[in-house]
Amino acid sequence: MQQFFTAQIRTAIFVFLLSGILTYGFTYFFITPKYESTAVIFPPNTHANIHLVSAGIRFGYDKEIGEQLEILNSTAVRNALVQEFGLLDEYGIDTNDAFYLEKLQKEYDRNISLDRTINKSINIIVRDHSPLRAAEMANRLVVLADEHMSEIVHKNVELAATSALASYQEKAALITAMTDSLDAMRLAGESVWTYGEERKSGRYQNYELQYRRELDRFLELKMRWEELDDLLNESVPKSYVVSIAIANGKPVYPKKGLLAMLAGALSVLVYFGLLQLKKST
């Protein structure tokens, strides 16, 4: 009996080792490994008002983190990365397929992920068959997101500046017309100096009060347009890169050692199951 159990144990060990070695060899020779690289960034601190691009160097809060994640996940950034690195060919996507964009998105999400940490940083994680490409894509995503954010901000500022300039010019024309009207009223004798004192008609006083209100509004519009015009020449704050992605020589997929152990353990279970079935019959 003791020899029987010893033989069983020896056989189980042999089955475990054989299955593990075969599985390890299969994953080593027939499964292309994937490598992972991670870039860590802090979104820049910004404001929702006109001083967006001059907010300083402090890191962003929840609002900025959410915006940065949206930019990183945007179609524009994804398409730029796909085109630059030829991911359609890399993922084996046939553009003639009616659902190729859906398949591309699934492969993209499977290989590229974004994690928001408790420290308010963002981890950009990329997996690829080439460790160098994985690192390059992670670092390139940071640049593409910053460029897209800058493009959006400048486009919005440009639209705001154009609108502000139009309002400023319209108000300037009104101020010019009202100034001419005041001069005409003075010439008509509605504002005269008598013994060092200016005497104004009621109509002139009311019109002058309205003129001063319009002039204050004109100066506000002028200041707003000048601020927006200055912002067009400023650069949008970029993400602070805590650590750039580097090429890692150790693949994360497949986990050959773990798969080998699982295969060995499963084979041993099957072996003892067959023994138990044979004994019962």
Image (cartoon, helix red, strand yellow):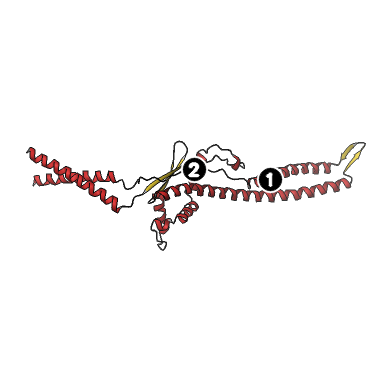
Say what amino acid the circle numbered 2 marks.
Answer: Gly
Residue displayed at 12% across by 46% down: 277
How many badges with numbers are in the image? Answer: 2
| Residue farthest front in this picture | 249
Taking depth in this image into account, of 81 and 228 the one nearest to the observer is 81
Rendering coords of residue 63 (x, y %): 52, 40
The disc, 2 or 1, on the residue closer to the chain's N-terminal end is 2
Taking depth in this image into account, of 238 and 197 the one nearest to the observer is 238
Residue displayed at 78% across by 44% down: 211
Quarter the N terminus occupies: top left
Q: Residues within 10 Å of mark 1 (few under 14, many from 20)?
A: some
Secondary structure, mark 2, is: helix
Residue underneath mark 2: 66
Rendering coords of residue 121 (x, y %): 47, 39
Residue displayed at 65% across by 49% down: 161
Badge number at residue 226:
1
In the rendered view, tell whether residue 19 sits above or below residue 90.
above
Quarter occupied by residue 199: top right
CB atoms of marks 2 and 1 within 8 Å: no
Residue displayed at 80% across by 44% down: 207
| Residue farthest left in this picture | 1
Rendering coords of residue 67 (x, y %): 51, 44
Secondary structure, mark 1, is: helix
Taking depth in this image into account, of 40 and 163 the one nearest to the observer is 40
Q: Residues within 10 Å of mark 2 (few under 14, many from 20)?
A: some
